Amino acid sequence: MIRPRLIAVAVATSLTIAGVAAAGAAWAAGPGDDPANWRKVDPENLMQLSVNGKEILVELRPDVAPAHIAQIKKVARAGDFDLVPFHRVINDFMAQGGDVELAHPKARYPNLKAEFTWGRDPAKQKVTWLGMTPEGDKIGYFDGFLVQGQSDELAAISYPAVAKTWMLHCAGVTSMARADDPNSADTQFFLMRQARTGPTGLDQKYTPWGWAVTGLDVIRSIKQGKDEENGVLPKGAADLLTKAVIVADLPAAKQPAVYVRRTEGPEFAKKLPELAVTDPNEACYLPPVEVIVERAQP
């Protein structure tokens, strides 16, 4: 029986959140040689998902949702995400999986307290702002993904000096499913296929914990359910999450090196005049942030 962890459906669409340049050729100078413009993702906070023989790489964000990341790593390292079905998939919305009891009946994990937002320290967590909503929140890029929240100026006159901030549920974002109780998330998660942002969307209602730096096409290829069944697939019909592994646990030669364009860097700054937005849904349609994946040659 599928335990109910549902995500409310809202009306919105989006395009991509992350662009990918897979490095296969030799580099005279790679992103690792340009730290001012490229950020290397820590392999301890990078999860490799295998679906239908294809790869999704998800950057985990313990600064955004520390308790959720700790549990996700625990589940992945126990092998309890492996062979779990994506039991509910809605084409223009999300792919929901992670109900570990469907594949591992003895697996048990505690419910988690909601981490819908976090207190961002502007001195340590710099956001490249793109605009302000009519309500006064600001929208911008933080480490390559989109966020919304209070301004740095408001944090400066607050105690403690932090700004309430949240990830936007753009395409590619990974977030936690739950029941009606905000503090009922455990292992079930969903991968955003399209955006659900703003007051009618999922922001500040569910806990986002990462973003797919590669593999949005794979997320969108996961077998969908029927609309009349609310996306729920029959038993045995769903695509499986074949394997989930923390990249740091792979042999060194098999670890992909992922670099994200620094959205606070000088090269990205040249694009800022073209990126002004005042609406979170509009932000999800912005040109994708560049990602480079380097792999050891066979």
Image (cartoon, helix red, strand yellow):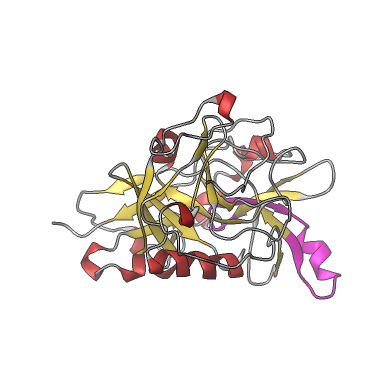
x, y percentage for residue 11?
68, 30
Quarter placement of the C terminus: bottom left
Membership of 287 in magenta stretch: no
| Residue 279 in the image: above or below residue 128 | above
| Residue sitting nearer the eye, 26 or 96 | 96
| Residue sitting nearer the eye, 72 or 161 | 72
Residue at the spot x=57%, y=37% of the render?
Answer: 286
Q: Which residues are magenta?
A: 142-164
x, y percentage for residue 137?
79, 50
x, y percentage for residue 266?
52, 56
**Residue at the left extreme of this rendering:** 298
Q: Is residue 40 visible?
A: no
| Residue 43 in the image: above or below residue 20 | below
Membership of 162 in magenta stretch: yes
| Residue sitting nearer the eye, 62 or 75 | 75
| Residue 35 in the image: above or below residue 204 | below
Q: Is residue 265 visible?
A: yes
Q: Quadrant of residue 200?
A: top right
Quick check: 4 left or right of 257? right
x, y percentage for residue 54?
31, 44
Quick check: 182 left or right of 191? right
Residue at the spot x=61%, y=30% of the render?
Answer: 13
Residue at the spot x=54%, y=40% of the render?
Answer: 171
